[in-house]
Amino acid sequence: MGKNNMSILSKPVLRAASILGLFSFIGIGLVSLTHSVTEDRIIENERQFITKTLREIVPNNLHDNDFLNSSVQVSDPLLAPDNRPVTLYKAFKNNELIAIIASPLSADGYNGSIKLLVAIKKDGSLLGVRVVSHHETPGLGDGIESHKSDWIYSFNGLSLQQPPLSGWAVKRDGGQFDQFTGATITPRAIVKAVLNTLKYYQANRALLTDANNE
Ligand SMILES: Cc1cc2nc3c(=O)[nH]c(=O)nc-3n(C[C@H](O)[C@H](O)[C@H](O)COP(=O)(O)O)c2cc1C
């Protein structure tokens, strides 16, 4: 009798459990599919932004190699935390290095990581800096974007010598870079990341300027 009761009860329970399991399975599948499609789109958008920005910072008349399609990956604590690989492009003209463009990652943003493009001319001066991605607060920390403010252009032409090292900080810390109203952490992170990229270039200059390593 007890056994019969159990088998009568277990059928609807089993059916309900199977339906629930099936819906969970479909739900998980849909969520992972959406996640992967969204992630692919983010990666593709970022790739397009990098291509457009690189063409803007290093225009065609400055180089004669297809540097967009010949990047290398490097790891250095000056460029990204945790030995994370960073993309490095090298623009050449007549077999001579014109500029390197690194894509350093700062972990010092208010809301986490900030990815940059830092273009340095062979002589060690900055051709341009742009922000590729960030999670800073809209209206507070997003003045680092070139279409929101001119702040990022304040790096143009600067180098490790000009200004001297003491100038490589926001004004609140005694340096020459403006902070934003109510937001010092974001610009501080960018200044540090750009300075570290210049230090990386100086430390690796011989290798990076070697045309044989194109
Ligand atoms: C909700 C919220 C969001 C914030 N977002 C940022 C931000 O994106 N970037 C930033 O530099 N500061 C941001 N701040 C302000 C910082 O907490 C900090 O007060 C400011 O950067 C000044 O720092 P300092 O006084 O140490 O120079 C935010 C504050 C709050 C409450």
Image (tube, rainbow, N blue to C red):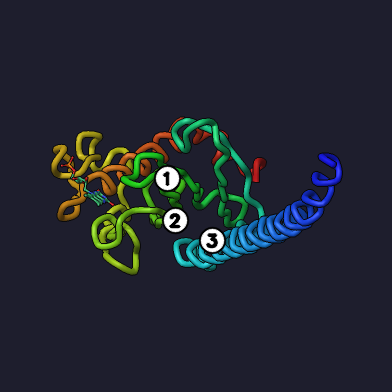
SS at badge 3: helix
* Mark 1 secondary-structure assignment: strand
Picture coordinates of residue 142, whole percent (x, y): 30, 59
- Identify the mark at residue 82; answer none if there is no mark: none
For the point 58% across and 54% down, the residue is 92
Does residue 63 show up? no
Q: Residue furthest front?
A: 1
Apparent side of residue 44 relative to residue 26 in the rendered image (left or right): left
Residue 32 sits above or below residue 167 on the image: below
Disc 1 target residue: 113
Which kind of residue does numbered mark 2 sit on? Answer: Ser
Corner quadrant of residue 25: bottom right
Q: Quadrant of the N terminus?
A: top right
Instruction: Name the residue located 15 percent from the left edge and 44 percent from the top edge.
Output: 171
Distance (Cα) linking label 1 and label 2: 8 Å
Residue 77 located left or right of residue 192 = right
Q: Earlier in the sequence, mark 2 or mark 3?
A: 3
* Residue at image mark 2: 133
Sequence-earlier tag: 3 or 1? 3
Amino acid identity at mark 1 = Ser
The residue that appears at 25% across and 40% down in the rendered structure is 168
The residue sitting at 30% across, 67% down in the picture is 148
Q: Position of residue 26 (x, y in %)?
A: 72, 60
Name the amino acid, label 3: Glu
Q: Nearer the viewer, residue 85 or 19?
A: 19
- At numbered mark 2, what does the secondary structure look like: helix, strand or loop? strand
Between residues 12 and 63, which one lies in front from this camera angle? 12
Between label 3 and label 1, give the one nearer the viewer.
1
